[in-house]
Amino acid sequence: MILSLDFSSDTPIYIQIRNQIILGISDGRLAPGEKLPTNRSLAMEIGVNTMTVNKAYQLLKQEGYIITERRNGAMVSQNLSKEESFMKRSHEALKLLISEAKINGVKKEEFLNICSELYEEG
Amino acid sequence: MILSLDFSSDTPIYIQIRNQIILGISDGRLAPGEKLPTNRSLAMEIGVNTMTVNKAYQLLKQEGYIITERRNGAMVSQNLSKEESFMKRSHEALKLLISEAKINGVKKEEFLNICSELYEEG
Amino acid sequence: MILSLDFSSDTPIYIQIRNQIILGISDGRLAPGEKLPTNRSLAMEIGVNTMTVNKAYQLLKQEGYIITERRNGAMVSQNLSKEESFMKRSHEALKLLISEAKINGVKKEEFLNICSELYEEG
Amino acid sequence: MILSLDFSSDTPIYIQIRNQIILGISDGRLAPGEKLPTNRSLAMEIGVNTMTVNKAYQLLKQEGYIITERRNGAMVSQNLSKEESFMKRSHEALKLLISEAKINGVKKEEFLNICSELYEEG
DNA sequence: GTGGTCTAGACCACC
DNA sequence: GTGGTCTAGACCACC
């Protein structure tokens, strides 16, 4: 799995790493139970410090997307949480995105179609 | 129009101001062509530095949501439909939200229903 | 407020800092709304790296005990969360402590008395 | 006696083994004088290294909960009452738990009731 | 001035 | 060998 990072972005690198891994899980490039690269190897590969990778993994672990074991490294969580609270948490962000879409003249049907396609994609 | 800010949030204040104004435009509290408060008066009202308001306005201007004229201050843009720039900007964020929803077990129908409701709301 | 740290302990320093601050809030040495030292000043004072203090503050923030603002530094949260979920989270740790007490011949009344005293203390 | 371990927990395996054995002694599943499995058999059973079991046993021995003899393997200690050493060891942990409970709005009566129930349980 | 992020190293506990 | 912690620096965004 290849991570595409933008070092000049405002989004911190560890957040970008987190986001990329979430996208990977969502579209199936990373399967539940699959091992992730070690801190060191991923850090080497993408040219960042191990602390930065560690921070991303800590966040993903805390969010329940991965688990880390001292002996086996990190792997994608096997029972992804079906967390009811998720939509509550992301409600505000979604509301903002939809408001922007509306202002930009995106009709409801159109917006739902885009969402539908993105959902199918991965 | 009242802006609700959370000073202890991770989201920078100028981004919060921007977001609130976008929500206001979307739900009709701010009409196209309507004048926004001056930097100074808004800064006074919400208790922040004028530079912070200025930064929010600059961002909104750059995104095409408002127009600023030296004489008249800022006002909501009157032709707001430019789908393409929006979809380019927001595609990534929407994709991430949908990916997270999927991983958390939110079914497509359910997600679209929520979007539909939020679209109707404001 | 003075923090007593044990650098030779197995408990990581950032956890010790967190624990000490929780104790301080509990016994009133730190009042809700009170400002905490800045990362830098606390780090200097106790002779650790700013990252270590930062990690402790991040944890306390995430647990809802403090809030951090970029401009004002960190302060004790003003509405401490009355979180119902707390006893659920700490149930296991309490169960273990009580089991140890029992094995060591501490009678129920005695244990409750100790708890009662500790509760009054701070 | 079955040990339930969580390999993805932050708590080291040898500590989890120790804790489970303490819980077992407390609720009577393990009686004073009862023999514990050998290092090797327990290690096999739960799928860990013998060193890990050994470390747990060493800790339990040091805390006075079990006795190890070269010939007979390990067994639950027959005289388990040494209040003082326990209270010294656990005082700090209990104090912290109670402080957190207080901050989270758990009243003293409520806390004592929960302790009382847990004490009866096992 | 503040918190937040990041680097290039290092050491340690666990297994 | 692995993740976790820590240091001594540095720079940046925000305000």
Image (cartoon, coloured by chain):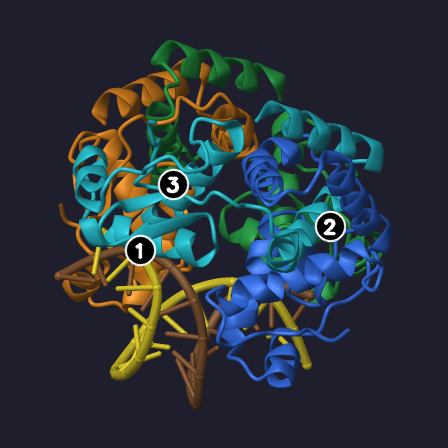
Chain colours: A blue, B cyan, C orange, D green, E brown, F yellow
Picture quarter containing residue C106? top left
- Tell me if A73 is positioned left or right of C66 in this view: right
Q: Chain of mark 3?
A: D
Count of marks overlaid on the render: 3
Q: Looking at the picture, which amino acid does disc 2 mark? A: Ser
Mark whose residue sits in front, 1 or 3: 1
Between discs 1 and 2, the one toward the N terminus: 1
What residue is at 41 percent from the left and 51 percent from the top? B60
Label 1 to label 2: alpha-carbon separation: 31 Å
Residue D100: x %, y % from top left: 37, 31
- Helix or strand or loop: what does disc 3 sit on? helix
Asked if residue C15 shows in the view, the reply is yes
Residue type at mark 3 is Ser
Local crowd at mark 3 within 10 Å, few (<14), some, or many (≥20)? Answer: few
In this figure, which residue is indicated by the disc labeled 1? Answer: B55
Residue on which disc 3 sits: D85
Res B99 label: 2
C33, above or below A8, in the image: above
